[in-house]
Amino acid sequence: MVENLTLSDEPLDPSQPAQDRLGHASLAQRIAEVLESLRSEDSSSVLALIGAWGAGKTSTLRSVASRVETMEGRWLTATFNPWLFSDEESLLLGFLKTLQDVMPRDRRWKRARESVGRFGQAISPLGKLTSLVGVDSSSILESFGRRLAEGPNAAKAQAILTGELKALQRPILIIFDDLDRLAPSELLQTLRLVRLVGRLPHVYYLLAYDEETLLETLSRTELVGDERGRALDYLEKVIQVRLDMPPLRDHQVSELFNDYFFNGLLTRAPSVTIDETAAERLGKAYWDTLIHTLRTPRSIKRLFAQAEVAAGLAAEGEADLVDLFLINYIRTHEPSLYRALPRLRGDLLRTPAGLFSKQRDFAELLEQWRDALKKAHVRADNVEGLLRLLRVLFPALDAKLSGSSLPRGDYDMVARRRGVGHEDYFDRYFALEVPREDLPDAVVAEAFAAADNETPSSNIDAVRDTLAKEPGRVLRKLESQLRIADDSVLHAVRWVGAAYHHMPTDQGLFDYRGRSEAEKFVERIFSQVDDERGLQMLSEMCDTDGGILLAVTVCASILRDGHEPAIHWRERASAFVAQRVLVAMDPYTDEPLTALGNRPMHFLWMWWHVDPEAATGWVRAQILEGRWDALEFVAANVPIAVGATGEVISQFDVADLERWVPLDFVLERLRPDLERLADDIEKFDRWEKKPTPENLRLAALKALAALAARRQPGGGAQQDNSE
């Protein structure tokens, strides 16, 4: 039940049986019965409750104490914490004080309490005495044992205390919890205390610890050394009865996990739902990996307590809950691996960092990942499980480790659920928030809502601004939220069109793809709509300067033979855009070429592909009638490439100018410039030159000069028009 779920690491209250979800109460009852049986057989015994950290030992100890207190023997119970004491003498006196405090404060127990006090007074100078004679403090308890045999005061005090306890015949249970937290010397001192001092009549001991940790600690003492067998032998001399916490059965782990996930975590994030696909991913991760490490109640509680920290991001609709939960599992149980994952994103994601990296055989890649997990201190027996978990979280890695690549459609599905395996969302799972450079999906949703209601909104401004800076990321968010059948698609293409001329033109390696990604975005939408809907979208785009540039670029692309995806209404689209371009160009008739932007030839070439006759006629008229400077036009045609040092001037073939204006006209118009700048043209070398306006003009003139020289008698082949 939900009301019985708790993420607290506090031991369970034995008075609240509803909290006992794992049957520890029945174990406590059996231990209590064992103690009651020992009471009738022996005057003192030492029992050990053994279990892993977080297995529920402390809760069971509490339950044992509450049960024996009501049994026939009417046990007195106390808990002694040896890690509170810094030295052996303090440990000894602290134990005796605990024994004294547990005794009832009535006349019947008065003499026994006084006997404990006299016993403590008799042994209290031991620390000072041994320091004077140079005895190492670690041998105080052995010295005390010898003193009981040799010195009358301590021996007499112990004998009196023994007699008092025998006469009272009331059992006392002293519980030592978390012995595995002690340092080697402290552990040895505590075990000696139980062996040499604590064997008083009717005083019983229940020690609780994780056996593997305790044995490892004992192996670091000089008494035992690095021998597991000797450590076990030593424990057997101290412990008479061994009791083990039963390991969690798979059914119990699953029951706890399901309750904490579905009745706990999901009830705290009611806006989040788990569909069948998400439940399948969670189930695969659970059976492949999680069940093998979630073997104690504490480990399960700890995982879900940490998950609550991250669940808010899923509740806000900014991340996938299952992915958040599984990444949180790695963060909680394998923190070194969690910190390493951002450095390994090239393999984890379908990004250029992974796509363009050195291709590796999938078997080689698999071994490299196994090594990476080992370097991240993942236990050897958990490496394969963690690798399977990573393959669930990162489909791109799964594909690479299978010797294939992740299809774009499958990757887009990861984006639609805002999964950690997509580059748009990866960073959120490590920042546990939407990073500042990211755009929250909620902002996109609210922008669509505001546009539907025709109300101004800062969210619309945020979408437009971020589109211009990081188009790839925002376009994918738009595509995941828009609905082809309603106005959201019109809003999206209008925003994309308005931002298009501000987008980066180069295909960078990080928030990459720039304008080309916007073009593909529009083409994918066009492939899903009929001509009437498509023309409506084109009309929205063409209402802005950037939008008309996008529209003519897309139309030029879809007119190519074999274009994918096929647009069945492409002829209507190109006719519509051609008409809108003519209308849009009319105000620019009396403007210089630079009025069309920094890279005007991109637009003019796209227009030429859509309507070559209209584009050529309009441009030719601009040049022949002197409205455009001929040199500026030729310079605008000089291609620019991206090299190691950034943008550089590329090789220029002046033959392409013939599509716009006769080359003879250009040579004649620019003859004065060719003669005036002959020396500069001769010295100019385009190699690694930056595309400054002056360099572009010189590159254009050099190509024209070369063309003019070849046209002279004996100047070379006429058809070679390149620089």
Image: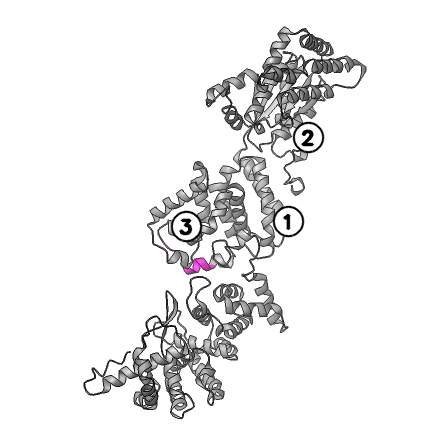
Magenta segment boundaries in residue numbering: 404-412
* Residue 14: mark in rendering: 2
| Residue named by callout 3 | 398
Badge 1 element: helix
What's the distance in space between the residues labelled 1 and 3, CA to CA? 32 Å
Say if 158 sits above or below 583 in the image: above
Amino acid type shown at disc 3: Asp
Say if 340 sits above or below 141 in the image: below
Which quadrant would the N terminus be assigned to in this image?
Answer: top right
Task: Judge the density around disc 1: few (<14), some (14-19), many (≥20) Cα neighbours within 10 Å.
Answer: some
Front-lying residue, 196 or 355: 196
What's the distance in space between the residues labelled 1 and 2, CA to CA? 27 Å
What's the distance in space between the residues labelled 3 and 2, CA to CA? 47 Å
- Residues at marks 3 and 2 touching, judged by CB atoms closer than 8 Å: no
Is 577 placed left or right of 5 in the picture?
left
Is 371 placed left or right of 95 in the picture?
left
